[in-house]
Amino acid sequence: MYKTWTFHRAGVRHLVSAVVVATITLAGTMANAADPKIRIFSGTDEHWVPLQVAKTKGYFAAQGLDAEVTVFTTGAAATEAFRAGRGDFISAGDLPSAAMWKSGNVIGLAPMSSDTEIFGIVGKKDINSPNDLRGRKVATALGSTGEFLLYRYLASGGVSPSEVNIVGLAPPEMVISLVRGDIDAFAWLAPFTTRAIETGKDIKLITSAKGLANNRIVLNVTRTFHQQRPDLVLKVVRAVNQAIEFTNSSPDEATKIWAAAVQGDVNRSVSVVKLISYGMKLDDGFVSDMNELAKFMVQKGALKASIEWPKDFDSTALREVDPKLISANLPK
């Protein structure tokens, strides 16, 4: 009799527990269903680690957001899809961001990262100065920050771009072409620069971008979304900033999260992640770098006009997240 009573009591306890769990699950499902859906476009390489961290660690969800992070293998594909209206937010490079701002449909929100250590020019070991590139074949992605870096490096030695055979190649082709000896150098980012050095014979880092150029990633939003849902813009910026703080404090774990999401190589990428300067600091350096790049691209005909900061960029959400992140005197 005692055993039978115990069984019934346990059964009731299990039934109550099941009802509680079911209720909590249902409530969670209903809450998630009510969360506004936002669409974020991202790149694949290590610069976009924080977006995968924000998704996986639940920083978007903690802000009440149902975030869909779509990864694109090329920046061109991402910006094309974004301009077609298939996304709300896009994290993109400095030049694509500025180009989208000038389209009138996109507005900048905050910096996300910068780097000079993994951004550079690699080439044959007999190249030691800009003068050594005269008459040589050098690759980069034309109309990119890589081309900007190459021009700045040549100018530092008084070399005209017309004295160099500059060719446009995709990053994987740069590595293959340099290793085969089809080109003498290329200007781009890690892991492509490091792969060339690791796999090629007599290939070295000619110069990092430090003091010459700065590769930056920027968070942007469609102007319509920005106008209609400033509350959600604030939540996205807050979640991304939290993810950046996690990435900086735990780069190994952040790299694993990113690698699992995009099928990346943790062992190869963790050193790259540690060299990237992730952060949303809107300082004079960011403004100056963006202005210089835009000026160069206007001269090249790759950009319609210089940046108009009051029109093209809105730091309101960033200021609400943390006023200390803003130190720049933005042009008015």
Image (tube, helix red, strand yellow):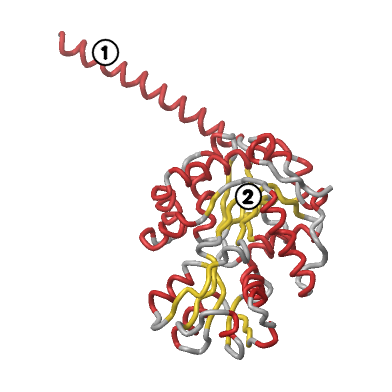
Q: Residues within 10 Å of mark 1 (few under 14, many from 20)?
A: few
Q: Residues within 10 Å of mark 2 (few under 14, many from 20)?
A: some
Q: Position of residue 134 (x, y in %)?
A: 61, 88
Picture quadrant where residue 92 is located: bottom right
- Name the residue located 54 percent from the left edge and 50 percent from the top edge: 278
For the residues labelled 2 and 1, say whether their Cβ atoms are less than 8 Å apart: no
Relative horizontal placement of residue 94, taking residue 25 as reference (left or right) = right
Whichever of labels 2 and 1 marks the residue nearer the N terminus, that label is 1
Relative horizontal placement of residue 199, taking residue 320 as reference (left or right) = left
Amino acid type at mark 2: Arg
In the foreground, 330 or 247: 330
Relative horizontal placement of residue 259, taking residue 332 as reference (left or right) = left
- Above or below, 38 against 10 in this view is below
- Name the residue located 55 percent from the left edge and 61 percent from the top edge: 116
Q: Position of residue 307 (x, y in %)?
A: 79, 58
- Above or below, 313 against 116 in this view is above
Rounded to the nearest whole Å, what is the CA distance between mark 2 and mark 1?
49 Å
Kindly identify which numbered label has been placed on residue 235: none
Amino acid type at mark 1: Arg
Quadrant (top left/top right/bottom left/bottom right) for the N terminus: top left
- Above or below, 273 against 132 in this view is above
Q: Position of residue 74 (x, y in %)?
A: 59, 67
Kindly identify which numbered label has been placed on residue 39: 2
User: Foreground mark, 2 or 1?
Assistant: 2
- Name the residue located 22 percent from the left edge and 16 percent from the top edge: 7
Q: Position of residue 20 (x, y in %)?
A: 42, 22
- Name the residue located 47 percent from the left edge and 73 percent from the top edge: 205
**Element carrying mark 2:** strand
Q: Which residue is mark 1?
A: 9
Number of on-image labels = 2
**Element carrying mark 1:** helix
In the foreground, 199 or 255: 199
